[in-house]
Amino acid sequence: MNLRALRTLVEIDRVGSFQEAAERLGMTLSTVSMQMKTLEEELLFPLFDRAYRPPAMTPAAREVVRHARAILAEVDAVRALGDELGVLKGVIRIGFVGTASVRLLPGFLLAAGREQPLAEFAVESGVSTDLLRRVETAELDAAVVTQSPDTPRSIHSEPLQREAFALAVPSAAKGFGLARCCAELAFIRFLPSTGIGLLVDGYLARHARPPRKTVTLDSVEAVMGCVNAGLGFGVVPEPDARRYASHAHVTVLDDPPLARVVSLAVRAGGLGPGQPEALRHLFAFAAP
């Protein structure tokens, strides 16, 4: 079975179209289409319903993709056995949670270009829960996420830095504590299904009454924008609170404290010998 065709199929599943997969893989559309037809002939069943435009993957194709990811991960691991210990080579797919990318990504990429010139990094962004899922299914080689007790056992997390959370309130509410904020203001919260959201919601459940009103947004910047506008209060990582505060008052939560650990998540056996350590080393140059 052609490994290139399997890689192409996995990429089509990831991006959703033949055209975009061809562009990302540096191939022509006709080459991608030919690879898929040849793979279908070899498997003896269709992978795409071509009545749709673009062609839609069949349920059987989804199962092939699941197996293909595992096969390709094993092949990559075997090939890596001959690599020099700790040397990163080829394309490494790494995801960054948005709230950490602002502080860590620039320094990481600068260090990568200097310390690991044989590697090319394909960077993507997302929320922690989605990035962890994609590491687990081998769509990503690694991800920088908010560490969570719900991390799958197949993933190893290495702490990179610790960040305190802060209470951000409108300037008119300066001096309000968490209890008064919950009683009098709307809670502008980050997505509750994310690493940050899970930590904050758990903290409020333990240490405050339910907020009078809750508004859910999908970015920390948007949360702080609403706080700046006087629409309510937020609980976000302190570096983000201070970065985006323009008309808000920010105080570190310390009674009791709340913090998150930003970690590098890699799938067990997903990288070659010494490579997870080499990848983590690049973040030593990226810490703020």
Image (cartoon, grey):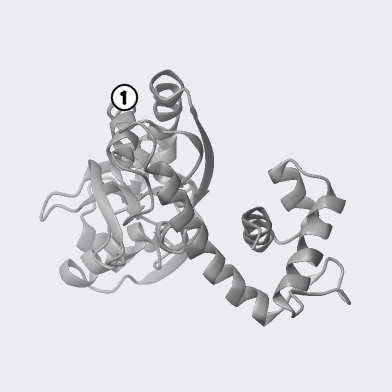
Residue displayed at 21% across by 63% down: 179
Residue displayed at 73% across by 40% down: 26
Left or right: residue 252 compared with residue 266 = left
Looking at the rendering, which quadrant does residue 161 occupy? top left
Left or right: residue 18 compared with residue 102 = right
Q: Is residue 168 above or below residue 73?
A: above
Quarter holding the N terminus? bottom right
Residue 85, image x and y in percent?
30, 33
Between 233 and 35, the residue placed more toward the observer is 35
Residue 123, image x and y in percent?
52, 41
Residue displayed at 73% across by 74% down: 47
Residue 211, image x and y in percent?
32, 70
Quarter holding the C terminus? top left
Q: Is residue 227 visible?
A: no
Left or right: residue 2 compared with residue 180 = right
As drawn, the residue found furthest toward the left would be 255
Is disc 1 placed on a helix, strand or loop?
helix
Q: Residues within 10 Å of mark 1 (few under 14, many from 20)?
A: some
Q: Is residue 81 above or below residue 156?
A: above
Residue displayed at 28% across by 38% down: 274
Q: Is residue 77 visible?
A: yes
Residue hosting label 1: 285
Residue 216, image x and y in percent?
47, 65
Between 172 and 237, the residue placed more toward the observer is 237
Q: Amino acid at mark 1?
A: Phe
